[in-house]
Image: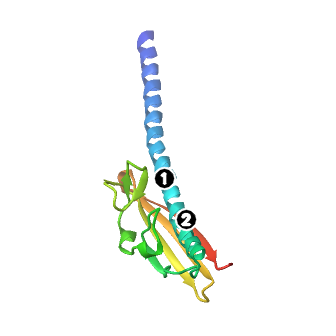
């Protein structure tokens, strides 16, 4: 009788450990996706910042080619490469370079939209980068970053 009680207590203990382990692994995946999405959103802001810096380095207007609207952008985009159609499609992963691109082979669940809003007056630009993805159970996640750039030069 004592043996059966001891086995029951141990079984309940092991079931609790396995339940916690299973939940922990699921949350680990959610956190990893949030980390990737946060970096992709930051990259969207940095793409626009790089374009403004390149414009100034060439002696062009700081916001040349950066019109208001929603765009898709990848890490090496220039102003002429900003594509409105890309804002609605998921990024792909290039395993050879470890970068997210639209022309890579491996599809991902991450969709990035970079929104540019030129503030009237021509000396300020609001840039928002939003990364969305669906996870297990169809839950929709979203990370939003915003920055403002100024013609301070």
Q: Residue at x 35, y 66 (%)?
A: 89
Crowding near the residue tagged with mark 2, few <14, some 14–19, many ≥20 C-alpha atoms within 10 Å:
some
**Quadrant position of residue 101:** bottom left
Depth check: give the residue in front, 50 or 142: 50
Crowding near the residue tagged with mark 1, few <14, some 14–19, many ≥20 C-alpha atoms within 10 Å:
few
Identify the coloring.
rainbow
Residue 62: percent from left, percent from top: 58, 79
Q: How many dots with numbers?
A: 2
For residue 134, above or below residue 88: above
Indicate the quadrant containing the C terminus: top left, top right, bottom left or bottom right.
Answer: bottom right
Residue 50: percent from left, percent from top: 55, 68
Q: Earlier in the sequence, mark 1 or mark 2?
A: 1
Q: Distance between the residues labelled 1 and 2?
A: 15 Å
Depth check: give the residue in front, 4 or 56: 56
Helix, strand or loop for disc 2:
helix
Please say whether residue 26 is visible from this viewpoint: yes
Depth check: give the residue in front, 145 or 74: 74
Q: Residue furthest right?
A: 152
Q: Which residue is drawn at 49% across and 81% down?
A: 68
Helix, strand or loop for disc 1:
helix
Q: What residue is disc 2 on?
A: 46
Residue 11: percent from left, percent from top: 42, 22
152 on left or right of 132: right
Picture disc at residue 36: 1
Picture disc at residue 132: none
Depth check: give the residue in front, 136 or 130: 130
Foreground label between 1 and 2: 2
**Quadrant position of residue 124:** bottom right
Residue 12: percent from left, percent from top: 44, 25
Indicate the quadrant containing the N terminus: top left, top right, bottom left or bottom right.
Answer: top left
Q: Residue furthest left?
A: 105
């Amino acid at each position: 009788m004592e043996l059966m009680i001891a086995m029951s207590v141990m079984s309940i203990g092991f079931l609790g450990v396995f339940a916690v382990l299973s939940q922990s692994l699921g949350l680990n995946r959610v956190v990893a996706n949030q980390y990737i999405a946060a970096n992709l959103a930051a990259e969207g802001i940095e793409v626009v910042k790089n374009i403004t810096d390149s414009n100034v380095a060439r002696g062009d207007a700081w916001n040349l080619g950066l019109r208001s609207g929603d765009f898709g952008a990848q890490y090496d985009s220039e102003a002429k490469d900003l594509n409105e159609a890309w804002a609605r499609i998921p990024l792909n992963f290039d395993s050879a370079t470890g970068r997210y691109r639209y022309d890579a082979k491996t599809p991902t669940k991450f969709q990035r939209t970079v929104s540019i809003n030129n503030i009237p007056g021509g000396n300020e630009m609001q840039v928002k980068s939003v990364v969305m993805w669906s996870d297990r159970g169809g839950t929709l996640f979203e990370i939003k970053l915003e920055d403002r750039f100024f013609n301070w030069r």
